[in-house]
Image (cartoon, rainbow, N blue to C red):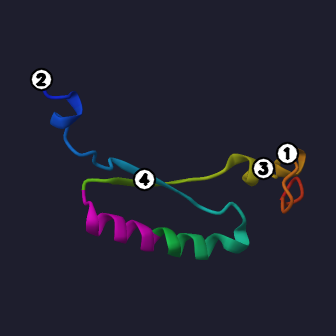
Amino acid sequence: MRPRPHQHQRPRKLFYVSLNLPAQRSQWDDGVSQFVECYDTIKAVSPQTIVYAVFQLERMRGLGARAGWKHAPPTGT
């Protein structure tokens, strides 16, 4: 009997992790601190994993109000 393909597959490894940083200036320092903490924790467990930051463009441009976001900043901030 032939083994099933999944029996020979290696366990999956995490190659990259993206962390969302806040777009609001008032939350920036806390967001950076949390990013650094997460980065260090991930690298301690998995040094080969690529860790990077992402931003939500809609929040940065204040476009959330048009999408109906309850706590969207006003346009232009």
Which mark is first along the chain, 2 or 3? 2
CA separation in Å, label 3 and label 1: 12 Å
Q: Residue furthest front?
A: 1
Which mark is first along the chain, 1 or 4? 4
Which mark is first along the chain, 4 or 2? 2
Q: Which mark is residue 67?
A: 1
Name the residue located 51 percent from the left edge and 75 percent from the top edge.
Answer: 33
Corner quadrant of residue 7: top left
Which mark is first along the chain, 1 or 3? 3
Image marks 4 and 3: residues in contact by CB distance under 8 Å:
no
Corner quadrant of residue 66: top right
First to last magenta residue range: 36-47
Q: Secondary structure at mark 3?
A: helix
In which quadrant of the rendered image does the N terminus lie? top left
The residue where tag 4 is placed is: 17
Could you tell whether 2 is left or right of 21 in the image? left
CA separation in Å, label 4 and label 3: 24 Å
Instruction: Look at the image and say whether residue 46 sits in the magenta stretch.
Output: yes
Q: Which mark lies nearer to you, 2 or 4? A: 2
